[in-house]
Every structure is written in C-alpha cells, then in structure tokens.
Amino acid sequence: MNRRRLALLLICFLMSNFAMPVDVQAQSGTVSTVNYQWLITISASQPKPLNFPNSTLAPAFEAEVNVQASSSGTGAIYEKFWGAAGNTLGLERSSNYSLPRGNTVAFKILHDSAFPAHAENQLVASALLRVLLDAQVNTNPVLFVVAPSDSYADLISCFEEQNFQNIDVVPETVMNRAIPLLVVDETGRLKTNLYYAL
C-alpha cells in the first residue's frame, strides 16, 4: 500500500476513534463532548421575507453560521448565506474568523423544518465548505460534523455535489492535499468519512 494512502487512512482512523466525542447525541440543542474547543453551528431556515408571493426565487433559504467556544453557551454570528434552487446567492460576513490557530473545531447542522428541502441542504453544504476552508487556512483541525438524522443521507449527497468524496476511494495524487471530514448523525450511529481535495 502506498505510504501516502496509509498515512491518510491512519489519520482518518485516529480521527474517527480518538477524536470522536464521547457522546454525540444532541442534548438541549448542544453536542456533549470534551474534545473540541470551538463549535460552529450552521442553522438553516426558510425565512418569510425572502419567500413573498410571486417571488421568482421562492423557495429561498438562509444559513446562519455561529461560532462559540465549547466552554461557553453564547456564540457570535460569523456569516449568513442565502440561496435558492441549489445556488448560493448572497453572503454577509458579520465578524472576522478569529479562532486561535491550531484550536480544534466541530460543526453542528440545525434545520428549522423537520424535513428540509434538498436546496436547503445544498446551501448548508456550500456554507460548510466555505467555513471549512477558513478553518483549513487557519490550521484549525475539524474533528467532526454532526448532522440531523432525518436529513443525513441528503446532506451526504449535497456534500458530494460540492466535490467531497468518500474516503474509501482516495486517489494517490491528492493524499497530501486532502481535507478529511467525518460526518455523523445526531445519534452517533451513522458515520461517513469524506475528504475534500484541494
């Protein structure tokens, strides 16, 4: 086996076994864990002001990205994304990406609706990729992403639309330039190892 492939598989194994939280179940809207230092929450919704009668964009969606320290319950809005029909149409940055270099990060995805539309999940995947690249530039390791169980399969599909690939099919040429991403559902039963090639 190629040394690069072995190294990436070892990193993914370590991330999935040792960097995983003790309990990834959602409890009172938070992820209970002791392993990450920052929680980045992506909350998706379908705001009424964007979905007025006769709107050519309807249904339009919003994804709000909040950043908070794992030890505090308060967070700050980092960015807001707006999109429709699978396209990101707008971005508003509310604050700078000011996480300390090297601190670990976990993502949590939330939806206002019980059964989010595919276009809403596409916007979430686009927002996550955008913030994931910020974390990569700032050398913040992303330990995992917690996704709602009801939309888990569709979110994985949307990540693949954003050119994330399954870790089982790793080309040797991108091994040293790949960003691994472990996606788990809120029960902790479903796990998918993805990577994004730079």
Image (cartoon, rainbow, N blue to C red):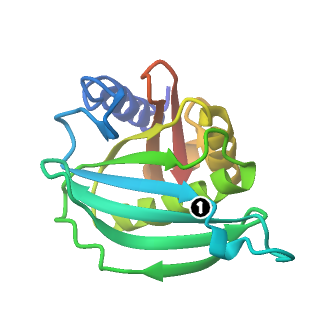
Q: Can the viewer see residue 198 in this picture?
A: no
Above-or-below relation of 63 to 35? below
Extreme-front residue of the structure: 53
Three-letter amino acid code of the residue under disc 1: Ser
Count of numbered tags: 1
Extreme-top residue of the structure: 189
Above-or-below relation of 192 to 164? above
| Left or right: 41 in relation to 159 | left
Residue depicted at x 56% and y 42%: 172
Residue depicted at x 26% and y 32%: 19
| Left or right: 124 in relation to 69 | right
Q: Position of residue 79 (x, y in %)?
A: 43, 73
Location of mark 1 (residue): 126
Q: Can the viewer see residue 152 in this picture?
A: yes
In terms of image quadrants, where is residue 156?
top right
Q: Position of residue 63 (x, y in %)?
A: 53, 63
Q: Nearer the viewer, residue 24 or 74?
A: 74
Q: Position of residue 95 (x, y in %)?
A: 31, 79
Extreme-left residue of the structure: 71
Crowdedness near tag 1: few (<14), some (14–19) or many (≥20) residues, C-alpha within 10 Å: many
Q: Secondary structure at mark 1?
A: helix
Residue depicted at x 67% and y 40%: 115
| Left or right: 71 in relation to 48 | left
| Left or right: 54 in relation to 187 | right
Residue depicted at x 25% and y 61%: 75
